[in-house]
Amino acid sequence: MEERERFVPRRVGQLMRDLAEMPWDDQGGTDDAEAFRAFARLAAALYHFEFHEREQSLVEAWDLMARDPGAATELRSALDELLDDANYITVSADELDDALHRESMIPLRLEVDLDDYEELLICRRDTSQETIEIPRWKGLRTEERTVTIEGRVVVFAKVRPAEWFEERGIDPAKRNLVPGHVSLKQFQRVPRADIEMLLPSTQVRYRPIDTLMVGVPAVASGIVVLATKLLPTIGLMLVLAGAWIGVRDEQPELDQAALVVLFGGLMTVGGFMVRQWSKLKNRRVNYLKTLSEALYFRTLADGPGVLHILLSSAEQQEVVEVLLAYRFLLAEPEGMTEDELDARVEQWLSDRYDADIDFEVDDALDKLRDLDLVEGDDRLRCRPLRDALAHLDRRWDDLFQLQPEDRFVATRASGSD
């Protein structure tokens, strides 16, 4: 069974307004709505501070990887955690195998050898179903098909070392690979059937239809050329061959006219072969162009750019989960169980956004406990709104309190000025 989507498709600002518009009790009203907005802004600021620290360590790990290949392991571990916080889902081996064997949405036949990679991680998010029109017969007709579209896809790939390719007699350059290279890319709106095209070593191959479209006209043209231009040449060559093997006693005369016929025939054959090879080669060039265009319009970021986008996305999702859990606990002064909270939030997301989302209630409650905003085990209750707002305000102030050693440095710096 396919894993349910965990991604909440709303940014903090949008969700804050939607949650603030929910009914409040008679005593609170507009003041409570404004207090909740302030609470949301403070929660977002606290997580932004935390993720700023994570950003520094992640970017440093990426830079270090250029000098220390072993740093890729540390980066991969941090990346796994970041993708989980951003509510990405790992593409399973079965899903990837299905993509490799399913017909592509673009008119290409793609092949990739997964053994080329020492590490390969593909994650997806924001899955949707869309009906698209696929052109057939050079656009003379179209076919409607419902396809699965992945809103975001992240690919982390580490190519095997050079020794691995040497042992198997494989030239990595022919597969567009650099031994030991680590790549990190993010894409948007990728059909699930085309996930394999995102890998660095994906190769374009000819389809059976290509053989027919190039081969059938080539055979027909060959018959025409044979019937109209090559019969004299073939006759002369048969005479020469018969004389050479001793079937004919009479030696043919190779005068100027015979040489012209022979040379003209050879030129015709050579030109015909070159034209057919050029047609096949041009078809491959067009396919590579199609693949390049598909990747160009789907590529969002590469390398450190992916890390920055993921950090921003993970920060948003962390705050979103906190706001959802706190707001629904706030609406129940008598408290509720974890299962009740989970069901209530998922139902609201379904009604409000028409989305089937697997709300990570346990993760959300862990965050609320870290912020000291919820208490209880079986029956969960949250801090009252204004108490919670004051509590977060104190936590924010505490972030910028100088330690004794920091005060000493600051005082000396001030005195030197």
Image: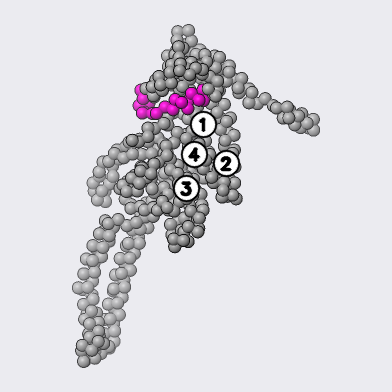
Mark 2 highlights which residue? Answer: 59
Furthest toward the front, the residue is 378
In the image, is residue 210 part of the stretch drawn in magenta?
no
In the image, is residue 353 part of the stretch drawn in magenta?
yes
Q: Nearer the viewer, residue 141 or 99?
A: 99
- Give the image location of residue 371, x and y in percent: 55, 22
Q: Which mark is residue 80?
A: 4
First reached walking from the N terminus: tag 3 or tag 2: 2
Q: Residue at coordinates 55% horizontally, 14% vertically from top-left?
A: 387
Boundaries of the magenta span = 350-368
Q: What's the colour scheme? A: one colour
Q: Label 2's element?
A: helix
Which residue type carries mark 3? Glu
First reached walking from the N terminus: tag 1 or tag 3: 3
Q: In this view, does 311 lie to the left or right of 358?
A: right
Asked if 116 appears above or below 134 in the picture, the reply is below
Q: Residues within 10 Å of mark 4 (few under 14, many from 20)?
A: some
Disc nearest the viewer among 1 and 3: 3
Mark 1 highlights which residue? Answer: 315
- Give the image location of residue 50, x and y in percent: 57, 30
Q: Label 4's element?
A: helix
Mark 3 highlights which residue? Answer: 119
Asked if 145 appears above or below 12 in the picture, the reply is below
First reached walking from the N terminus: tag 4 or tag 3: 4
Which residue type carries mark 1? Glu
Q: Residue at coordinates 31% horizontally, 50% vertically from top-left?
A: 107
Residues at marks 4 and 2, CA–CA distance in whole angstroms: 15 Å
Which residue type carries mark 2? Val
Q: Residue at coordinates 45% horizontally, 44% vertically from top-left?
A: 121
